[in-house]
Image (cartoon, grey):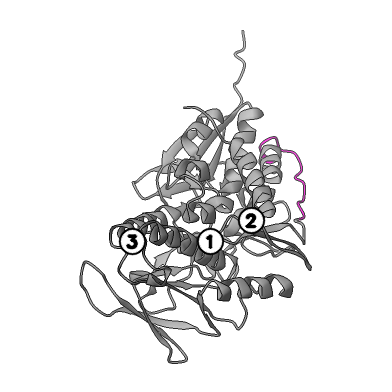
Amino acid sequence: MQQKLQPKVKDLVLIGGGHSHAIVLRMFGIKPLAGVRLTLITAAKKTVYSGMLPGHIAGFYSDDECHIDLRPLANFAQAQLYIDRVVALDLENTKVLCANGLAVDFDVLSIDIGSTPATVSVSGAAEYAIAVKPVSQLLEHWYELIKAVGKNPQELIRIAIAGGGAGGVEFALAMQSHLHRILCQTQQPIQNLEIHLFQRGQELMPNYHQSVRHQIQQILIERGIKLHLGESVCNIAPKNHRETKKIFEIKCESGLTIECNKIFWVTQASAPEWLKIAGLGTDEQGFILVQDTLQSQTHPQIFASGDIATMVNYPRPKAGVFAVRQGKPLFENLQRILLCKSLKPYKPQKQYLSLIGTGDEGAIATRGSFTLPPHKLLWRYKDWIDRRFMERFRFEL
């Protein structure tokens, strides 16, 4: 009797636990594909939902409320989970190489590792500034800072934020809100806190409509956040080395010099070098160039989404909303390529609703040229949207 041949198992490997991959994993759990071995490689066990991160900084959300635990999610998707950092791709032998020596074979690969702020061009930034990504390191520094302010609220604390996009603005307002509460609770003057926001261009949030930029600038000025517009940070150096209270000196190309205790780096995004070294087609910043199907322009068995990807035909800002919207079409095309079916193109929307937190349980709503001023009801709406999104990823181990 002739033995029936078993179909070959195909390996689908996901690198990174970003928003798109979280959605892909959930959908694979709901709609598994026979004959596919699913693997997730991620440097962290939890991934933050970017929409709730400023609210967490402000103290409105707990750590669990704003993080997706990838372990139960991978378990739900029946995916092998490796907590490791990818350092290289061997495209000739279709292997993913990790920091701890792990080599993972793939037939189809998807990359959703986000991005990191570009610090390389500024002297001292990599050594002394706190990058917003990886978020786990940012939060370690932030928890240390709020603990130190609570312990010694009488001391002057000066914070610098480099980057005047939406992220930098929301961080400035959220940090001020949280630290002001600590100072008020300890009956210390809020003047004990200074926040400096540096922006290379003459306007904040250049990707947004003028109506939003004007409102945001007025809010920052009214709340006493010191704006340094048209200022390019060119050097960061320690002024003293006392362990109790380090002071850093920020220098700008104009000659402006500011002293501060902490520097948070929220500037334009950058990509890891190993993507380009592997031979993937990338743009000038190193992000993977993808077609409308979210496939690599140079390697059709490789997909990319979220911040790490640049859609050739539809370039968009590096924002979490696009990563979330790419989740479902990415899942569908991954299933289709594994089933040897033709792929479907995805066209991202040009305009989208953006809800920008103002740090005081208020938010501004904007879509294209339409803008609503800050209001508590808009924050409640944003809170409802964010909590509903996170509920989709609550799984027990």
For the N terminus, the image quarter is top right
Closer mark to the observer between disc 2 and disc 3: 3
Q: Would residue 290 be seen by someone viewing this image from the given angle?
A: no
Residues rendered magenta in the picture: 337-347
Disc 2, SS: loop
Separation of disc 3 and disc 1 at Cα?
Answer: 47 Å
Disc 3, SS: helix
The image position of residue 145, as x and y in percent, is 35, 60
Q: Amino acid at mark 1?
A: Gly
Q: Nearer the viewer, residue 148 or 164?
A: 148
Tell which residue pokes out farthest to the left in this image.
242
The image position of residue 255, as x and y in percent, is 43, 92
Residue 296, numbered circle: 2
Label 1 CA crowd tier, 10 Å (few <14, some 14–19, many 20+): few
Q: Nearer the viewer, residue 1 or 154?
A: 154
Closer mark to the observer between disc 1 and disc 2: 2
- Please determine whether, in this image, residue 304 is positioned above or below residue 180: above
- Please determine whether, in this image, residue 177 is positioned above or below residue 396: below
First along the sequence among labels 2 and 3: 3
Disc 1, SS: loop
Separation of disc 1 and disc 2 at Cα?
Answer: 11 Å
**Residue bearing mark 1:** 279
Dots 3, 1 in contact, CB < 8 A: no
Q: Residue at x 72, y 51 (%)?
A: 293
Q: Residue at x 44, y 58 (%)?
A: 181
The image position of residue 102, as x and y in percent, is 38, 43
Q: Amino acid at mark 3?
A: Val
Q: Residue at x 40, y 45 (%)?
A: 84
Q: Residue at x 27, y 80 (%)?
A: 239
**Residue bearing mark 3:** 149
